[in-house]
Amino acid sequence: MSVVIITHNRREELLRTLGRLAALPERPPVIVTDNASTDGTPEAVARGHPEVRVLRPGTNLGAIGRNLAVRHVTTPYTAFCDDDTWWEPGSLSRAADLLDDQPAVATVTARIVVEPGGTEDPIVAELRASPLPRPAGLPGPALGSFLAGATVLRTDAFRGAGGFSPRLWLGGEEELLAADLMAAGWWLVFDDRLTVHHAPSAARDPTRRRADGIRNTLWTTWLRRPAGAAARRTASLLASVPRDAASARAVLRATAALPRILRERRVVPPEVEQRLRLLDATQRASRARRYVG
């Protein structure tokens, strides 16, 4: 098991996370992609954690920084976490055991505990209650996507699916990759026995993240869903986002790329579409996946 992290100008949060990871009994190798930080992050990591490999692409790659890091992974499994999340001791070992035992599973997502209060993230209840059918022997609820900051993946499955799309940058970038993994025959699961802690960083731009999330959801929908389902989800999304300039710009950016999206469109197989359709109602009612900020 290797751990992959992307970071940008969150030196103190990253150092805290690296300290937590260094104390894990599994002692996984850690690879960090520094997305062009200007706060001395790479130098601080070199001083405090010389065992950590830091990649410096020289520009902010967003989620593609994970793709870059996975190129250097030599273990069969890769655990993602963010610079403000960390894995609980024993969780990585349990994830590796699960993937050893379940050759059809590509990703296993952990429960998320929000610090400093130690309360469960609201998304956890939705993961537990996933409406997707659960094949016999699957160790937890089947999912239609995953959370990059709290998921262990089969390294070869990630590479085989092409990793994260360079067009999406950040913000719901997991959904497109998840669809491609399912189309390739993989299952995605949630396991309550695994835990990731999340101490949300204050160093974030929620408005930009919201705008990117709206754009990316539209692109993913148009790229992979059949026409009818894509139209329904588009209408549902547009009805739920805040009515402001940021949302309008996000929709304009999405529609401006429509000719390219149509050229690249590759609809998922019917069995995958059935799973995604079961999730549509859950996503519409979700309180944890609202476009806010």
Image (cartoon, grey):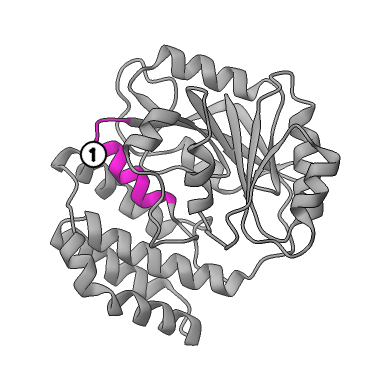
Examine the structure image and report whether residue 211 is included in the region drawn in magenta. no
* The one of 4 and 13 positioned closer to us in this rendering: 4
Residue at the (50%, 25%) spot, across then down: 77
Residue 151 versus residue 226 in the image, above or below: above
* The one of 26 and 276 positioned closer to us in this rendering: 26
Q: Provide residue 90's location: percent of width, then percent of height.
A: 67, 20
Examine the structure image and report whether residue 184 is included in the region drawn in magenta. yes
Residue at the (52%, 14%) spot, across then down: 97
Name the dominant secondary structure of the magenta segment. Answer: helix
| Rendered image quadrant of residue 189 | top left
Q: Amino acid at mark 1?
A: Ala
- In the image, taking residue 93 as reference, residue 11 lies left or right, namely right
| Rendered image quadrant of residue 16 | top right
Quadrant housing the C terminus: bottom right
- Specify few, some or many for label 1: CA neighbours under 10 Å numbering under 14, 14-19, or 20 or more: some
| Residue labelled with disc 1 | 183
Q: Provide residue 41's location: percent of width, then percent of height.
A: 76, 54
Q: Is residue 231 visible?
A: no
Badge count: 1
* The one of 146 and 193 positioned closer to us in this rendering: 146
Residue at the (33%, 48%) spot, across then down: 279
Q: Provide residue 195's location: percent of width, then percent of height.
A: 64, 31
Q: Provide residue 240's location: percent of width, then percent of height.
A: 41, 72
Furthest-bottom residue in this view? 245
Q: Which residues are magenta?
A: 174-186
Furthest-right residue in this view? 47
Quadrant housing the N terminus: top right
Name the element at disc 1. helix
Q: Is residue 124 visible?
A: yes
